[in-house]
Image: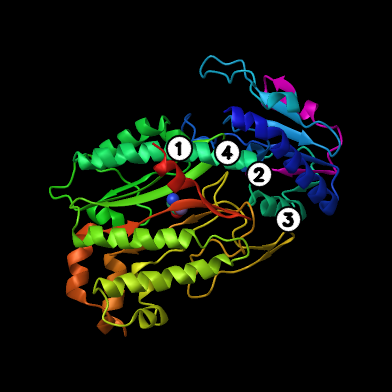
């Protein structure tokens, strides 16, 4: 944490400067950022899990607290209105503490409505950032105006040294957990047991995970966002795909690894081949490179592997041109990563907004920006054996392009995905994930 403390003041300076500029463009004098609050479940007195507004987490380490506000006007010290109810059903949050508190005027309220008295009386020239359905009707001049939000999202894509440090720590936690998960898999554990090993390895609760862990044995590796945890291991173990992260101060890592249960078999060799290509793709995370170029390159490489392993009978070029690779690799190469796993702004055309759409053959590509210094992107190519997509290919015009016997043999293995988190820097790519795996 000392490095976080050292880097935080200049991060906050960057955030303030970004707001100063964006607020001028949006013609507002103040900004109020609402954390949000947990919603009640239907006909119940239980709440859904609470996730704080990422804009609030950009200003200060996520405390996961509800009913909080930040108020900021350029040239003033930001104010944190901190909700600390007098409660005995739930443990109230402790007083704000840590390296960041000296940078805020902090006032504590016991009831959520009291926050109104801590904001300026006239809010007609204040924009509010928050989930619209959760906002009180306090006369804000604008709710999430695009003129304000677009430059914020653009800047959020380019990480400060503090943010990179948060993501480095998140990655170290994630890598420790991935090691524990692999060991559990090698011991023959069920998906449920692997998940427990993962959380223990990360030293985090399920609620601290930045997204629902994907823990798939055998065919479950072919379900891109597989969401269950079988409690018994399969009778015959073939493979394991785990896509799971960890968090630090509100920032995420997003890591995927794939394993064969039978080292040296064809599936294992395919994993090694994709791993080799994936590292070469990570080396392509260069400032000035349009991210969609990396995605198209990934398709060419996947086609090469499909051809090398005799899964298709056509040339790699034909496999790409005919769209056959999209059956085996039906998602985008990756996305921006940060306060959100699929961080904002991936399709933004510029700081003022506008949409840069993905290529029409690749609608699932989440990142279309040209790589800039400070962008953190995932590089996550995959090769899957997804029965429903294979059925469509088998009944279509390109059926003859596939060696079906070879493909059917691979079905029990599900799929392969290998995912690292890479920073684009003026000195070249910095792979946060491989660095953490390489550390003792
Ligand atoms: N880690 C899940 C995803 O990127 O969609
Ligand atoms: Mn991802």
- Say which element carries label 4: helix
Q: Position of residue 147 (x, y in %)?
A: 77, 55
Does mark 3's beta carbon lie closer than 8 Å to ligand 1? no
- Compare marks 2 and 4 and give the one earlier in the sequence: 2
Q: Using the image, tell me which numbered label, if any, was put on residue 165.
A: 4
Residue displayed at 58% across by 65% down: 368
Quarter of the figure with the C terminus: top left
Where is mark 2, residue-wise? 160
Residue displayed at 46% across by 63% down: 332
Residue displayed at 51% across by 19% down: 90
Q: Using the image, tell me which numbered label, if any, was put on residue 146.
A: 3
Quarter location, residue 196:
top left
- Say which element carries label 1: helix
Classify 10 Å Cα crowding around label 3: few (below 14), some (14-19), many (20 and above). some
Tell me the CA gap for discs 3 and 2: 23 Å
Residue 113 is inside the magenta segment: yes
Is residue 134 visible in this depiction of the protein?
no
- Magenta stretch: give its range: 106-134
- Say which element carries label 3: helix
Where is mark 1, residue-wise? 172
- Compare marks 3 and 2 and give the one earlier in the sequence: 3
- Say which element carries label 2: loop
Tell me the CA gap for discs 3 and 1: 36 Å
Q: Position of residue 22 (x, y in %)?
A: 79, 50
Tell me: residue 325, above or below residue 100.
below
- Compare marks 4 and 3 and give the one earlier in the sequence: 3
Tell me: residue 66, above or below residue 376.
above
- Single out the mark in the foreground, 3 or 2: 2
Q: Position of residue 46 (x, y in %)?
A: 47, 30
């Amino acid at each position: 944490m000392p490095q976080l403390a050292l880097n935080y003041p200049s991060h906050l300076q960057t955030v303030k400067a970004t707001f100063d500029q964006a607020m001028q463009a949006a013609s507002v004098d103040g900004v109020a950022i609402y954390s949000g609050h947990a919603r009640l479940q239907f006909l119940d007195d239980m709440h859904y899990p609470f996730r704080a507004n990422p804009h609030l987490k950009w200003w200060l380490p996520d405390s996961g607290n509800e009913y909080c506000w930040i108020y900021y006007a350029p040239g003033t010290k930001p104010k944190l209105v901190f909700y600390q109810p007098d409660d005995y059903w739930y443990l109230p949050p402790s007083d704000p503490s840590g390296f960041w508190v000296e940078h805020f005027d902090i006032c504590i309220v016991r009831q959520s409505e009291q926050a109104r008295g801590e904001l300026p009386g006239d809010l007609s020239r204040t924009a509010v950032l928050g989930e619209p359905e959760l906002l009180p009707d306090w006369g804000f001049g604008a709710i999430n105006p695009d003129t304000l939000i677009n430059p914020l999202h653009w800047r959020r894509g380019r990480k400060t040294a503090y943010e990179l440090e948060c993501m480095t720590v998140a990655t170290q936690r994630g890598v420790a957990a991935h090691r524990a998960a692999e060991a559990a898999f090698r011991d023959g554990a069920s998906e449920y047991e692997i998940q427990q090993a993962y959380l223990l390895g990360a030293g985090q609760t399920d609620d601290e995970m930045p997204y629902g862990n994907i823990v798939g044995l055998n065919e479950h590796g072919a379900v891109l966002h597989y969401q269950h945890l079988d409690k018994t291991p399969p009778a015959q173990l073939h493979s394991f795909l785990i896509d799971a992260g960890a968090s630090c101060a509100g920032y995420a890592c997003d890591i995927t690894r794939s394993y064969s249960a039978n080292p040296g078999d064809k599936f294992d060799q395919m994993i090694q081949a994709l791993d080799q290509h994936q590292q070469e793709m990570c080396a392509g995370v260069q400032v000035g490179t349009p991210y969609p170029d990396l995605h198209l390159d990934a398709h060419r490489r996947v086609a090469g592997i499909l051809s090398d392993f005799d899964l298709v009978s056509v040339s790699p070029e034909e496999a790409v041109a005919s769209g056959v690779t999209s059956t085996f690799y039906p998602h985008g190469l990756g996305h921006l990563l940060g306060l959100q796993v699929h961080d904002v702004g991936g399709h933004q055309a510029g700081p003022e907004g506008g949409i840069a759409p993905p290529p029409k053959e690749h609608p699932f590509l989440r990142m279309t920006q040209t790589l800039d210094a400070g962008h953190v992107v995932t590089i996550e190519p995959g090769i899957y054996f997804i029965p429903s997509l294979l059925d469509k290919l088998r009944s279509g015009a390109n059926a003859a392009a596939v060696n079906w016997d070879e493909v059917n043999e691979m079905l029990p293995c599900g799929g392969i995905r290998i995912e690292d988190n890479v920073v684009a820097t003026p000195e070249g790519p910095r792979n946060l994930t491989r660095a953490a795996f390489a550390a003792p």
